[in-house]
Image: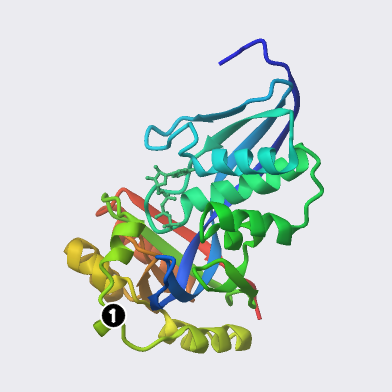
Amino acid sequence: MNFRTEVLLLLYEKAPAKINLTLDVLGKREDGYHEVDMVMTTIDLADRLTFELLQEDVIQIQTYDRFIPNDQRNLAYQAAQLLKETYHVEQGVRMTIQKRIPVAAGLAGGSTDAAAALRGLNRLWQLNLSVDELAQHGAQIGSDVPFCVYGGTARATGRGEQIEHLAAMPHSWIVLVKPAISVSTAAIYGKVDYSILGQHSTEQMVEALNQGDYSTICQAMQNALEPVTFRQYPEVARLKEKMQKMGADAVLMSGSGPTVFAIAKNEERAKRIYNGLRGFCTEVYCVRMGSER
Ligand code: ATP
């Protein structure tokens, strides 16, 4: 690192994780991607990105997490490179990523850092791009990036990049557990068995969210990737069963896993589930969701 590089401006962006309330796989496309229909919502578990404007024409990534690349493999780096090339930006940036979101967890940690980089660099480099334009750029980096650019609660279709905004989750609590394994999203999608995909539930989830109908939201929670991940990692299936027995209103794996989350309307019950799991797993989080209706 060049310590003589002059820092001209400093700003921050929060990069929240997402969970899937549904994930329907509709089929495989000719371009190799899977056609999906899913509902995602951002949660209050976030990385923090710091942006320092540099006079020198460089992109630097600083991260203190040894599992995160600090070069062009980092999705935040790719976001910076894309904006730089597209808009001929001659200034540089040093991005410091403080990771709180577990890595390779099904929580879109890399995608949300890329989205935060797009938002932050739009301000830092004064590009004046709209959120929709940032989301379009995001689709070039990864299928979950457009959703992460907007945040909130949304239905995502196509390969995940087409976003339709939905009403926020009704007030509830989410307890997340990340087992000590890393799951490759590509490997899980590659093993999807089309003969056991089951019923789709995204349409029902969309209606339930629009009506603020908490019990139907819980019923409609479904993820077509669960059987694939459960087959490869039976401990994730056992974790889901354990969380169900602890009195959650519903339990689901997020994305390709291995994170499993429980939803509870009642704060006391969520805290009990959280406390019960902390002795059993190291990465356990409890977050408040949504608004009162
Ligand atoms: P998704 O839910 O979108 O499939 P994920 O939560 O399962 O994502 P990530 O946390 O994004 O997975 O990590 C997947 C891989 O991406 C990691 O192994 C890591 O090497 C790489 N990666 C690149 N940039 C980042 C980043 N900024 N943060 C975390 N991982 C990153």
Secondary structure at numbered mark 1: helix
Q: Is residue 174 above or below residue 293?
A: above
Q: Residue at x 28, y 72 (%)?
A: 192
> Quadrant location of the N terminus?
top right
Q: Residue at x 26, y 51 (%)?
A: 181
Total labels drawn: 1
Q: Residue at x 51, y 87 (%)?
A: 203
Q: x, y (%) of residue 128? A: 82, 48
On the picture, is 53 further left or further right than 64?
Answer: right
Q: Is residue 124 above or below residue 266?
A: above
| Ligand 1 within 8 angstroms of badge 1 C-beta | no
Q: Residue furthest front?
A: 30
Q: Quadrant of residue 54?
A: top right
> Quadrant location of the C terminus?
bottom right
On the picture, is 177 further left or further right than 113?
Answer: left
Q: Is residue 73 visible?
A: yes
Query: Label 1 sits on what residue type?
Result: Tyr
On the picture, is 121 further left or further right than 250?
Answer: right
Q: Quadrant of residue 183?
A: bottom left
> Dot 1, crowdedness within 10 Å: few (<14), some or many (≥20)?
few
Q: x, y (%) of residue 50? A: 63, 35
Q: Which color scheme did the rendering employ for the protein?
A: rainbow
- Residue annotated with mark 1: 194
Residue 173 or residue 182, whichever sits in front: 182
Q: Is residue 219 above or below residue 48?
A: below
Q: Is residue 269 visible?
A: no
Q: x, y (%) of residue 251? A: 36, 73
Q: x, y (%) of residue 107? A: 44, 57
Q: Quadrant of residue 269?
A: bottom left
Q: Residue at x 72, y 36 (%)?
A: 11
Residue 291 or residue 216, whichever sits in front: 216
